[in-house]
Image (spheres, helix red, strand yellow):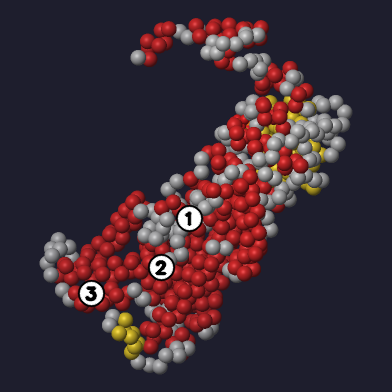
Amino acid sequence: MDWLQILSNTASSIIGPATIGYALAAIGLAVHFGFAGLLNMGIAAYMAIGAYSYAISILTFGLPWWAGILVAMGGSVVFSLILGIPTLRLRGDYLAIVTIAAAEIVRLLFLTTTFDKYTGSADGLSGYHSSFRDANPIPPGTYGFGPWTYNETGWWVRIVGLVILALAVLIVYVSMRSPWGRVLRGIREDEDAVRALGKNVFSYKLQALVLGGVFGSLGGVVYAMPSNVNPGVYGTSLTFFVWTALLLGGAATVFGPLLGALIYWGVMTLLSNILPALVTSGILPFMSTTQAQTLRFILVGVSLMLLVIYRPQGILGNKKELTFVK
Amino acid sequence: MSSDVAPRQRVKSTGLHIGDAVPGVAKVDPILIADSVTRSFGGLKAVDVEHLEIPRNAITALIGPNGAGKTTLFNLLTGFDKPDHGTWTFEGRSLAGVPAFKVAQRGQVRTFQLTKSLGLLTVLENMKLGAKGQRGENFWAGLFPHVWRKQEDAFEVKAIELLTRFKLDTKKDDFAASLSGGQRKLLEMARALMSDPTLVMLDEPMAGVNPALTQSLLEHILDLKDQGMTVLFVEHDMHMVRHIADWVVVMAEGRVVAEGPPHVVMKDPAVVDAYLGAHQDVDLGVVTGRYAGELTGEASELASEIQGLDHSPDPAGKEQTT
Ligand SMILES: Nc1ncnc2c1ncn2[C@@H]1O[C@H](COP(=O)(O)OP(=O)(O)OP(=O)(O)O)[C@@H](O)[C@H]1O
Ligand SMILES: [Mg+2]
């Protein structure tokens, strides 16, 4: 086994676009669930809307890359309004059901051949990079050291991703310490109490849904930015991966989603390198390399269960502030 | 405002009503007027109030047996529940169909019988949440602390002043979840006062509050009146009702069955029958023989009734349970 290569791949994943994308989506989910108590089980739909809006704006409408990002944000706002206006008046669990259903609808709409011209249906979308790469101020070449050596495109994606991530963290950090965030945290616990104090609970919940949704959509953009949009990615399992990352770090924290996404991708990369290596070197004789890849996801499922049972507040969370054990 | 000051003798507000004190009597200066408000749950008519007026700047007690519909009426008047039909106005403006948060914004603020302190917020955060017209509660303004910092500081001063009054100031940085049941009641009441309401509606504010604190709380409620507020409260503690209420409304089975000044209403035979019971002034300890005391005629009557109860259980029943 080439341990050096395995560790290098793992270290490299720390600032990979996938990690940044997950971190953004997890921050969105933290706004929804951690701070406002909205049980959103459709974060994958937000990421899909982000990725597709970005790609379609560029490919079909010939917009520049930054306009694609704005369209992605706008798309998520529209989706939040469609989702939220009829459902946010209902109690928490109903939102979970509706968001799962809505996420499936969104995925199938992107997958159907009816809109093949725009969405590429099962093939997804690719080849939308030129505008983004043209805007790259970094001269061609490779930079960095050790595992973090990338070419100019690799760095450009990571820099843009990290800037968006930093802005998202800043916004969540500041807003959750403001009176606005205080109202949200009140709503998370008891809507009626907050209503009795004269706050428009529905409006606040909708605002939280929109804010978190924008981050989820930006997560989708960053995730798809360097590669392609693949409809297979945005299934229900993506939602659970983001949930795992969120719960790992701490749902009601600002930096938890970051840490969670980082650990999630670190461990995933590590396992995807180690497990096949173990199989080929005969240490896991009872499985094939493909099965070893599937084993990763089984381990994710198990760790999600263990987390919720034994450490629901996550790594960074405050035991007193855990939100789904009362 | 200090509670160390010896209790002042207060005069009860009188002359609140026009004409005979019958259910639905008109008030000289009503702040809240309800007309034919009804609410049924299945076949049960929980509230069926034909006409009710709450006098301004007075303390009105709403009493009645368990299940009389007091809490349901509170819910209806504050927009937390929708009536089958009915209209009501607050300070002359209709409140029917107005959502709960707008009712609160208009100055009609309530507390809940089942306390709703927000356990995962600190006591101080709970208090600040109660304040009205906060600039920082707008998302965009919230992102710029210098916009709301000053206002926030002012709220903090006010919150600590109120917390001191309610003896919670030492707890201000604790999570509200760590408070005792009685302390949560106090916090909820203090929080409601953060918004400078015109009408304060308290659902059993004294349930679970210790006697010494009840005393000072009664003073605070009387203070509210001095400050120009109107208080409507539900309470089962008749001493409290007698002590501070200027007006008493009695509900039973959803209807207003009597209203009037406390000393009159409490002697109303209908009220005694439906709610207070005939033996309200009898010391139960004396009746059951635990304390020595003079058995009045009324008490000995009750005592013999209880004796009858003691002998009635079927002795065979006991054996069956073993
Ligand atoms: N949500 C509900 N669904 C069905 N029935 C209800 C509901 N809320 C109240 N009721 C019924 O309405 C009646 C009035 O209840 P309410 O809570 O108003 O009584 P209350 O006067 O506040 O009593 P208490 O003094 O015990 O607090 C009761 O018979 C109760 O069973
Ligand atoms: Mg009640």
Residue A320 image offset from top left, x and y in percent: 44, 51
Mark 2: secondary structure: helix
Reading the chain from its start, which is encountered first: label 3 or label 2? 3
Amino acid residing under circle 1: Leu
Q: CA distance from mark 3 to mark 2?
A: 22 Å
Horizontal and vertical percent position of residue B262: 75, 26
What distance separates the C-alpha of mark 3 from that of mark 1? 36 Å
Q: Earlier in the sequence, mark 3 or mark 1?
A: 3
Query: Which residue corresponds to mark 1?
Result: A39
Q: Quadrant of the C terminus of chain B?
A: top left
- First in sequence: mark 1 or mark 2? 1
What residue is shown at x 76% (from left), y 24% (from top)? B263
Kindly identify which numbered label has been placed on residue B154: none
Question: Could one spot residue B230 in this view of the protein?
Answer: no
Q: Quadrant of the N terminus of chain B?
A: top right
Horizontal side of residue B295 vs A136, given as left or right: right
Q: Is residue A252 visible?
A: yes
Left/right placement of residue A128 relative to residue B184 reads left
Q: Where is mark 3, residue-wise?
A: A6
**Comparing marks 3 and 2, which lies closer to the viewer?**
2
Q: Are marks 1 and 2 in contact (CB under 8 Å)?
A: no
State the residue position of label 2: A258
